[in-house]
Image (cartoon, rainbow, N blue to C red):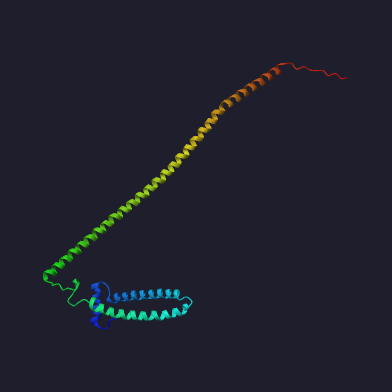
């Protein structure tokens, strides 16, 4: 790690980060982490192999303690190696020379004509933005009006659907009532002959009773004498 208190070093690291798109220190730390992980994985694999080959001759606890010390020394050694390697990379490969400048850092000569052209371009852009904003507001107002009209049409359609439903229910009720009337009429028509026949028989019976009464009233009343024994 370089001395970050040095203004020149800080400036070089910032410019390298801007130029390459990543920090040199982050690049070195990534390499160091990958190398350390690979070393640890290999040591764990060696530990498992030794434990399998010397089963019964060495305990797992002793082998674990031994490999912990080995892993610690390998990690320290790897970090020292990559510290030197990272210093070399930052000072020779990831260092942007002072003669190199990014496009946005290059000086562009400004003239009165160029300034005027920039001002006119900015004003034109602002005018276009204002026109686009006005058009957007008008379009939004038109769309809002269309939405309101669609809502009104929807409400009218709902009312028409309700009215049609009510009319359909009323028509169904009228149909049922007419069917009942027809049924009553058919029953009445079927009972008419029976009623007429009953009335005729009643009239005939009444006439017969009347004639009998008239005959009985025309005969003389006979007095019978009772003999007493």
Residue at image x 44%, y 74%?
Answer: 53
Seen in the image, is 124 located left or right of residue 216? Answer: left
Seen in the image, is 199 located left or right of residue 108? Answer: right
Q: Position of residue 203 (x, y in %)?
A: 62, 23
Q: Position of residue 67 (x, y in %)?
A: 41, 79
Seen in the image, is 66 located left or right of residue 113? Answer: right
For the C terminus, the image quarter is: top right
Q: Height in image: 138 above or below 88?
A: above
Q: Position of residue 140 (x, y in %)?
A: 28, 57
Seen in the image, is 37 located left or right of residue 141? Answer: right
Q: Which quarter of the picture shows residue 119? A: bottom left
Closer to the camera in the image, 133 or 11: 11
Residue at image x 11%, y 71%?
Answer: 112
For the N terminus, the image quarter is: bottom left
Q: Position of residue 189 (x, y in %)?
A: 54, 28
Q: Height in image: 193 above or below 152?
A: above
Furthest toward the right, the residue is: 229
Closer to the camera in the image, 71 or 54: 54
Residue at image x 50%, y 32%?
Answer: 182
- Please state the total of marks drawn on the protein image: 0
Q: Which quarter of the picture shows residue 100? A: bottom left
Closer to the camera in the image, 137 or 86: 86
Q: Which quarter of the picture shows residue 220? A: top right
Closer to the camera in the image, 187 or 202: 187
Q: Height in image: 219 above or below 108?
A: above
């Amino acid at each position: 790690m370089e001395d970050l208190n040095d203004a020149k070093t800080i400036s070089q690291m910032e410019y390298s980060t801007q130029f390459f798109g990543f920090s040199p220190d982050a690049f070195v730390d990534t390499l160091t982490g990958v190398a350390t992980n690979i070393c640890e994985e290999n040591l764990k694999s060696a530990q498992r192999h030794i434990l399998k080959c010397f089963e019964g001759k060495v305990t797992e606890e002793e082998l674990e303690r031994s490999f912990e010390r080995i892993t610690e020394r390998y990690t320290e050694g790897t970090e020292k190696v990559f510290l030197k390697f990272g210093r070399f990379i930052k000072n020779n490969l990831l260092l942007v020379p002072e003669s190199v400048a990014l496009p946005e850092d290059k000086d562009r000569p400004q003239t009165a004509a160029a300034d005027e052209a920039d001002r006119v371009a900015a004003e034109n852009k602002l005018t276009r933005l204002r026109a686009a904003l006005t058009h957007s507001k008008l379009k939004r107002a038109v769309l809002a009006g269309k939405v309101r009209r669609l809502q009104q049409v929807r409400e009218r359609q709902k009312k028409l659907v309700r009215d049609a439903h009510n009319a359909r229910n009323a028509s169904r009720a009228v149909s049922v009532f007419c069917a009942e009337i027809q049924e009553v009429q058919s029953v009445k028509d079927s009972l008419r002959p029976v009623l007429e026949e009953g009335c005729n028989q009643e009239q005939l019976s009444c006439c017969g009773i009347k004639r009998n009464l008239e005959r009985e009233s025309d005969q003389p009343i006979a007095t019978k004498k009772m003999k007493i024994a």
